[in-house]
Amino acid sequence: MLLTRVSPVYQTLARWGRRSQRGGGLLLSRAVGCSSSRCHGVSPGEGSAQPAEAGSAHAMYRDTVLLPRTEFPMKLTGQKLLDRELQIQQECGFAELYSWQRERKATKKFCLHDGPPYANGDPHVGHALNKILKDIRNRFEMLRGCQVHYIPGWDCHGLPIELKALGELGTSGLSPLEIRQKAREFAEGAIARQKAAFQRWGVMADWEQCYYTFDGAYEAAQLKVFQEMHGKGLVYQDYKPIFWSPSSRTALAEAELEYNPEHVSRAIYATFPLATLPPKISSEDAGLENVSVLVWTTQPWTIPANQAVCYMPNAQYSVVKRADSSQLLLLATERTASLAALLGTELQTVATFTEGSQLEGGICKHPTIPDKQVPLLPASHVTMGKGTGLVHTAPAHGMDDYSVASQFKLPVECMVDEDGRFTEVAGPKLQNLLVMTEGTDAVISMLNESGALVLEEQCVHSYLYDWRTKQPVVIRPSKQWFINTASLKDKAKEALQKVRVLPESARGSLLTMLDRRTYWCISRQRSWGVPIPVFYHKESGEPLINKYTIAHIAKLFKENGSDCWWELPIEALLPPEVLKKSKAGPVSDYVRGEDVLDIWFDSGASWAAVLEEEMEEASEEPESRLSRLAGSLRKPLATESDPRADAYVEGKDQLGGWFQSSLLTSVAVRNKAPYKALVVHGFAVSEKGEKMSKSLGNVVDPDEIINGKEDGSVPAYGADVLRWWVAESNVFSEVQIGPSALNSALDSISKLRNSLRFLLSNLQGFDQRTQAVEPQQMYYIDQYMLHLLREYSMKVTDAYSEFDAGRVIRILQAFISRDLSSFYFSVIKDRLYCSPEDSLGRRSCQTALEEILDGVTRSVAPILPHLAEEVYLHAPGHDKAETLFKSGWIKSSSVWRRPGLEEAVEGACAIRDSFLSLIPGKHASKYDLTIAIEPGLLFELMESLQEEPTSSDSQLAELMMAARVNLTSKLPRDLHPDALLSHGTFLINLEGGVIREDSPYSIAVMPTSAARCPRCRRYTSESADCLCPRCQTVVSHAG
């Protein structure tokens, strides 16, 4: 045969083999694929031994046929499935796996830092999507031999927890400590429920060593970050407009806001009479004495706080006269036509000013406050998309307005209290009215009474809402603590250049949100959070905060938790030595602050609390991680050895949340991002693509997915179906879930299970440690399957490395359906069932099957750990106490890629494809096949598979699945006239094209004259009641 005997072709191939072993030569890919030929299987009723009915001619030989046997169940459903998954978790040590891999020696490490889920409710499918996606990557890295660093965490502070914990009680009459106790108990309950669900889903972690943002050591590490940032001048206190939630009575950061696109405002057009004409407008221009500036706003309640009217410096403005009233109005020229249509009257142009700068120096009368005048001022935020091109400006209640006030030294006068009501500053007519409702009504009435109201309309537009209470927010000035993000943005962008973002399209969104954030309000007026470690002088109100006060408070938090801020007397919080170092007066001069830190600062500092030192010390004693991190408080955080996580993996909502807060704090302290890669996944939505909502009745509960509903309307799918759904989905977009997706996942797993069962059942009693065949001695098709398995393993490994479990599943399904089920399994059944049990051919096949079983099982293990471990429990050749996850990744070998092997098998597959296309829908086993190939490489390759001119049991005959194969250099002249003929070519491409041969072949197909063997059921017998020669030998030896 070509690959075993010396011939000119073999010598060439042998040279390639030696060079390949030295790394000097590679056998390049085939030029003609044969995937289509591998899809032509045969009916299981033909060409292979099958169970026979008692009394039939086949029944007497049934005991001599080696049919598949296994205790691995074909199907598990209902309670049996659930019990089996829990049994697997117990028997295979799921709970101890993370600790085991942390204690083993490993040359490589992989750190996936867990973004803490919020401890305010039950587990949902969003949690499942996130946690399982992370676990798939962690299990893959662990199987590859990496030491995985993954500490689950929870975000435990904040308003949602406080609100849910207090319920209808509210905060009335409760002390901060009472509020905190109730909030802590609520958070702990939510954590326990979520943790139990994550464990049931098979998420690998040490669940006794999690991090919690309410842990004292965590809070201390967080204050260390705060101290570093304060020391660099990045934390400051200021009085300026912030987003304020009247429903929550607290300041909000941008990440805590959401837009309601269906918000309805009462928009108005109102006039500000010009008291003083701009100097550049000639006083000789007749008829301009009674001009009014026309403004438009969707927030009429802010009119009383107006301090200016702004214009666009380079725009054109006109004075127009209303045809229906002769009223003179000043507005942008390009807005005239749309306004005329809106007012339903003609607007006649009286004068035009080519540049807005000509309006400089103009003074307007305030429409609701007698004797008050406001200036016309230039501003860059004025646009022409809506309104009049002239913008009413209330510095206390608008961010752009505040910028104008800062530039022109305008007063910033707040007229709104913490409840969203007008204060006494707004006047007696407005005091105590809610600005968004009754206050708006009152202001519109005042404008109408003064003659300033031109038009009112309903305006549907996007408006900012509190993401927790789902109520509108207002902008109001308040004395708050801020981080100067403007000074960090350039460094943050530079750090992001070194970060890989998946998908890359998410990078733009992250940068846009970063650009939009000039400052970060980090103070919150609540009780449940980490107190800002600041003291205020009783008389001057000046804050006392420095490295000494912060370090002391951090030490107290580490020892006692942050409750001590309220529990301890102020003398313990501000001891004499701290006051002395701070050069401050007596402790009696100070009161402790009442604000807490934004929860985005809590979680944004997690890199300091969790990653510090963890990645550097893999062999520490298994003490609490959080107790260790407190040691880092004694040294600066900004060291070159500080680690970065390999990946942060969260939903797209974290682009403006945790991804950003983590980046800003880390860049501020360490001048680097805390992560090497960001993986941004979409949200879980219903099968119709709708956001899940209880009111819509489309919420999918992961507990019901696993355990089913009691009424039977939802079956028990088990944890692996949930995991398959995550893996199969395109997680970089919105991920749909519902009955169709879950049933599809269940069906896919069932098909995979049956394929694995076929492999197991044909390995009964096989032990690869003693019975495996060396690769060089294996049948060529078996060697070829190992070659395909090696390619498969490399593709799967690459896909996992890219967080693309969906591609893993597609590669897996293609390998099983095309290469195994439709091709290899069909071809080898006769050899498996009917050859002698210990024959070379059968052991060769079992060697390949064992490697395939092992490779496929390991490849799917990160996605389906329960199924993988169940298969491993039934698989031969390893100690019963050993588990799959402790035994490594796919073990492919470069030896499996032999020179000439691929061309030999795939050349035969190309011929097989031509053969099967001649007999569509018929059984190949009923035909004799003649293959004619001119002398050359292809002929030599086919001789490798069949040395004899005619054979019914050669490797070539097995591949063709024909009754008999004749191999010749040309078709015989005396072919039967009914013979089916076909011609084709196969391109042999070796050494990158150094050797290329386009080899023609011809085939002739005729029904076989042989009879069907009563044992193997192949058409290879002389008569129907006679065994074929191969079966005669097997049976005689068995007897």
Image (cartoon, rainbow, N blue to C red):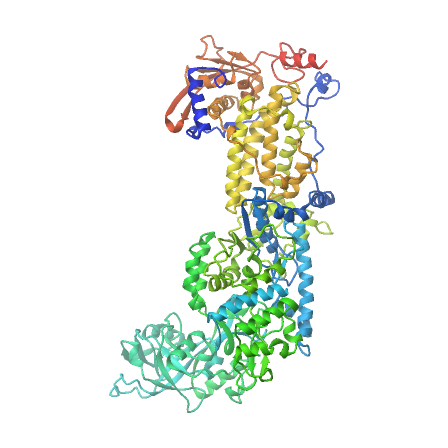
Q: Position of residue 931 (x, y in %)?
A: 48, 16
Q: Nearer the viewer, residue 911 or 186?
A: 186
The structure residue drawn at horizontal position 50% and vertical position 34%, both measured from the top left corner, is: 791
Above or below, comparing residue 380 to residue 1021 in the picture? below
Q: Nearer the viewer, residue 225 or 831?
A: 225
* Horizontal side of residue 640 vs 92, given as left or right: left
Above or below, comparing residue 34 to residue 608 in the picture? above
Q: Is residue 899 visible?
A: yes
Above or below, comparing residue 537 to residue 965 in the picture? below
Q: Is residue 214 visible?
A: no
Q: Position of residue 799 (x, y in %)?
A: 51, 43
User: Residue farthest to the bottom?
Assistant: 371
Total labels: the figure holds 0
Q: Position of residue 290 (x, y in %)?
A: 34, 88
Above or below, comparing residue 784 to residue 146 in the picture? above
Q: Nearer the viewer, residue 209 or 903?
A: 209
User: Residue farthest to the right?
Assistant: 55
User: Residue farthest to the top?
Assistant: 974
Q: Which image quadrant is residue 64 in?
A: top right
Q: Nearer the viewer, residue 868 or 998?
A: 868
Q: Position of residue 439 (x, y in %)?
A: 53, 82
Question: Which quarter of the rendered picture does the C terminus lie within?
Answer: top right
